[in-house]
Structure formats: structure tokens, C-alpha cells
């Protein structure tokens, strides 16, 4: 069985005080439920604090983004090597907000994925369709293109410990969710896409759901065969909600 992954993406939120409180809560969740893997992704200024606090616990820390470059004249960029140097274990790659607000192409995202793997960090590749693409019946087409861009660039071997997060763009931050059956359909399709390249890769790769995940909806999502956890946005800023979602994943893994 694939080990469930619960990842919290704080986005542009937090402070030193908030980081201390949320990391402490996430540490208690991670240490009390060994059947799941737990990671939080604070803003860059708080990564060092989070890593220091989480030291000795089972909680992993991740970056919210990463550059496709290792070093050089790239003002404002943060490399995967730097994330690894401060103790990060994960990095989000291709989040829909980066794709939409910063114009990140599939090719750029594939480069970021490769750079992350090369630095020894596990990338969480975010894929998903907009509402317009969904209404046009193109959800699977879009997800296939986004996954294929990375597989074509790094190959099966290069995918390594990569995780895929299916995040329907129309459900992020809106309170709407794809629903367990609809989410499972896309997750199963993503696994089938991976299987076209390598069945072992498809079987071992964790595919998590991200799209307004709440404690109330978590258990139904995690009951689905191909949903291996969650990438959690707003609810990760609420210690009780995040903990409840993690417990739902732990229950699924037993």
C-alpha cells in the first residue's frame, strides 16, 4: 500500500509566531501517526525556522516553489540546491497559481521538476484543469499534457520519488470540491497515464488530491482507491482542521 501523504501549503500566509504554532501542531500529527507522511510548506522566509523546529520529528518541510536554475543572475529565484541546503525534503512544482499568475509553461515546470530531483528533493507536481477546460470536456487532455511534459523530460527513472497532486483549478480556494467519485476518476486516469510508460512507476507513485480539502470531506476522498493523500491549502492554516485531515488519512492506511 502506498503511504498516504498529507501536505500543507501555507501560500502567502504566516509569521514567526504562526510558523511556531503550526509546525508544532504538525509535528504532533506526524509523530503520532507513523502510517502517514506529513509535510508543511511555509513561505521561504520561515523555512529555516520550520526546519530547525521540526528537527528530530517525523515532520518534513517543503518549499512552495523552486527555480529551474541552480545558480546565477536570476534575481528572486530560489534553487533546489538551496532548499536542500536548509533541510527541505519536498518542493511544490507547477502549482496552478504559478502557472496562471506567473505564466509558467509545461516546459519550465518540467525543468523545475528535474532540478528538484537532481538536488535530492522530492517534487510534488501539481496538475489540473480550469473550469473552462472542464466544461469543454478537456480535463483529461489537460492533465495528460501536464504529466507527459515531465515524463518526456526526465524519463521514468528521473521521476524518482515524485508525487503528483491533482488540483482542479476551479476548486482551489473556492470551497468547492471535485467530489470523491470525480476526483477518483481523474486520479485513476493519471495512474493509467503513468502505466503507459511503466507499470511499476504507476503503482508506486503517490497521487494526492488538492482542491479545498476539508476535514468533513477527507474521509470520503481517502476511501478512493487512487487517492493517496491531500495537498491542503487554507485548511492547513487551521491546526485542528489539518490534524483532522491527517487522522482521516491515517485511518485509511490501517
Image (cartoon, rainbow, N blue to C red):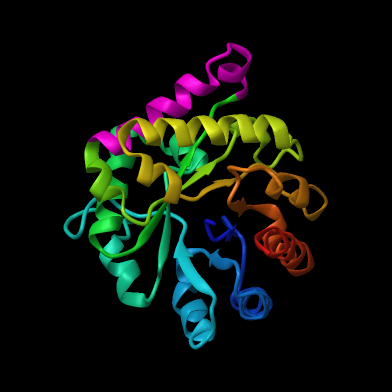
- Of all residues, the one furthest to the left in this rendering is 72
Say which residue appears at 38% left-offset and 76% top-offset.
Answer: 87
Give the camera-side residue of 176 and 196. Answer: 196
Query: Which quadrant of the structure image shows residue 192?
Result: top left
- The residue depicted at 28 percent of the width and 60 percent of the height is 79
Q: Residue at x 69, y 49 (%)?
A: 222
Q: What stretch is highlighted in magenta?
A: 131-152
Please identify the quadrant where the N terminus is shown. bottom right
State the image coordinates of residue 21 (x, y, percent, origin top left). 68, 78
Farthest residue in the top direction?
A: 136
Q: Is residue 141 magenta?
A: yes
Secondary structure, magenta segment, majority class: helix
Position of 177 relative to 72 (above/below):
above
Q: Extreme bottom residue here?
A: 56
Query: Can residue 75 be seen in this snapshot?
Result: no
In the displayed structure image, the side of residue 117 where residue 227 appears, left or right: right
Amino acid at each position: 500500500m502506498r503511504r498516504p501523504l498529507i501536505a500543507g501549503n501555507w501560500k502567502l500566509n504566516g509569521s514567526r509566531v504562526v510558523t511556531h504554532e503550526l509546525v508544532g501542531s504538525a509535528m504532533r500529527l506526524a509523530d503520532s501517526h507513523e502510517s502517514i507522511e506529513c509535510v508543511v510548506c511555509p513561505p521561504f522566509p520561515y523555512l529555516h525556522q520550520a526546519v530547525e523546529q521540526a528537527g528530530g520529528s517525523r515532520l518534513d518541510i517543503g518549499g512552495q516553489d523552486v527555480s529551474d536554475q541552480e545558480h546565477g543572475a536570476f534575481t528572486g529565484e530560489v534553487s533546489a540546491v538551496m532548499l536542500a541546503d536548509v533541510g527541505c525534503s519536498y518542493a511544490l512544482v507547477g502549482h496552478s497559481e504559478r502557472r496562471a499568475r506567473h505564466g509558467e509553461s509545461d516546459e519550465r515546470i518540467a525543468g523545475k521538476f528535474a532540478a528538484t530531483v537532481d538536488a535530492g528533493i522530492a517534487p510534488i507536481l501539481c496538475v489540473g484543469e480550469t473550469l473552462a477546460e472542464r466544461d469543454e470536456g478537456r480535463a483529461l487532455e489537460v492533465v495528460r499534457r501536464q504529466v507527459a511534459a515531465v515524463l518526456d523530460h526526465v524519463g521514468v527513472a528521473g521521476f524518482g520519488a515524485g508525487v503528483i497532486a491533482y488540483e482542479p483549478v476551479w476548486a482551489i480556494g473556492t470551497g468547492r470540491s471535485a467530489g470523491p467519485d470525480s476526483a477518483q476518476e481523474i486520479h485513476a486516469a493519471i495512474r493509467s497515464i503513468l502505466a503507459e510508460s511503466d507499470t511499476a512507476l504507476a503503482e508506486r507513485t503517490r497521487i494526492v488530491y488538492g482542491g479545498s480539502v476539508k476535514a468533513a470531506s477527507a474521509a470520503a476522498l481517502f476511501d478512493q482507491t487512487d487517492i493517496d493523500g491531500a495537498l491542503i491549502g487554507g485548511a492547513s492554516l487551521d491546526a485542528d482542521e489539518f490534524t483532522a485531515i491527517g487522522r482521516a488519512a491515517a485511518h485509511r492506511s490501517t
